[in-house]
Image (cartoon, coloured by chain):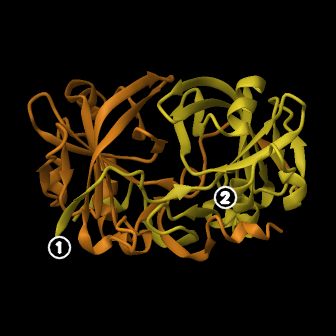
Chain colours: A orange, B yellow
Amino acid sequence: MARTALEPTTVLHPHPVLLVGTFGADGKPNLMAAAWGGICCSDPPCVAVSLREATLTYHNILHAKAFTIGIPSRKHVAAADYVGIVSGRDHDKFRDTGLTPLRSAKVNAPLAAELPFSLECTLFQHHKLGLHTIFIGEIVGFQADEDILGPRGLPDIEKTQAVLWGGLGNNHYFGIGERLGRAFSIGKNPR
Amino acid sequence: MARTALEPTTVLHPHPVLLVGTFGADGKPNLMAAAWGGICCSDPPCVAVSLREATLTYHNILHAKAFTIGIPSRKHVAAADYVGIVSGRDHDKFRDTGLTPLRSAKVNAPLAAELPFSLECTLFQHHKLGLHTIFIGEIVGFQADEDILGPRGLPDIEKTQAVLWGGLGNNHYFGIGERLGRAFSIGKNPR
């Protein structure tokens, strides 16, 4: 196999599909799709998402000091893509997708009722990196459908039917594939 | 469908499997697995990874001011799991897995030659969040196998055969599933 040096690029496999719920200063609920984020601390439990200042969500988070991160299922792929295409400045993205905004009981942000689970976050830290700012939310609430929970009472990826984004090199959404092995177990024979 | 409120938990679908390459102060190459990280800025191109202070990699990054993020393929799942189980303080994880350490030409860190692609990073920012600290690397180099590149010359997730971790609610590694639709396209009909 021949190795090659590419220009530095923002590709990593896989990217999640995160739906960020926020309220505007006018109280209007908004939803946007972001691929750059994920869990970033166990204690306190935190999740990160990176946003450009050009987005409405960037300003909504700074105003409300809160957001939600919802995880779409494969049946929500078109809705997730839509909320990543248009801006909440000129679209009511909940209405257009048919997703139902619910006010979080824990934080000043909406979540989409139909998604399998949502993390409810207060703004914990944010850091300007360059074109993107990383927003770190402390997870203070967590809502899930009962029927996607596994034996440990936590969301089970085989039940949520989660999706991922292929990234700049293969611009499709994909489902989750087959099991390859148990973590903290298959590595006992590392070769 | 019945919704339920769970205790705040660090679950999100999917988690990537990131192999973090560092040099110790003694020059020894190390590799660890991390699930909490991803791309976080387009300009400058940056990638984040969260680590506990208890890990050797945490100290290696602060010393060397550099790290690599390698993406495993499904054939590397056992090796990836292994480097997440044991510590580089008492194991030579490259030797144990049979992966070959290559010194990055761009940064003061090693990468595993057999992985489909690796991001080469200099330490750009780091922020203590709690038990975890988030390390943000500026991507200054990018190495890939030529045979995993797609039409745009970037790593193609269908060729890398990337893997993901199911998370706390389903502790398995999974492959990438089937295409569900094209991004920035399928959402034009959001319902």
Residue A114 falls left or right of residue B162:
left
Q: Residue at x 68, y 65 (%)?
A: B159
Above or below, A75 relative to A23: below
Q: Total marks drawn?
A: 2
Q: Position of residue B170 (x, y in %)?
A: 48, 69
Residue linked to disc 2: B150
Discs 1/2, front: 1
Find residue B105 and name its label. none
Which amino acid, by three-letter code, is at mark 2?
Gly
Image quarter hosting the C terminus of chain A: bottom right
Q: Position of residue B70 (x, y in %)?
A: 72, 49
Query: Gap between marks 1 and 2, in whole Å?
Result: 41 Å
Residue B102 visible in the picture: yes
Image quarter hosting the N terminus of chain A: bottom right
Circle 1 chain: B
Q: Are there few (<14), some (14-19), or many (20+) residues within 10 Å of tag 1?
A: few
Q: Are there few (<14), some (14-19), or many (20+) residues within 10 Å of tag 2?
A: some
Circle 2 chain: B
Q: Residue at x 21, y 24 (%)?
A: A63
Q: Residue at x 73, y 35 (%)?
A: B67
Residue linked to disc 1: B1
Which amino acid, by three-letter code, is at mark 1?
Met
Q: Nearer the viewer, residue B156 or A23?
A: A23
Q: Secondary structure at mark 1?
A: loop
Residue A36 visible in the picture: no
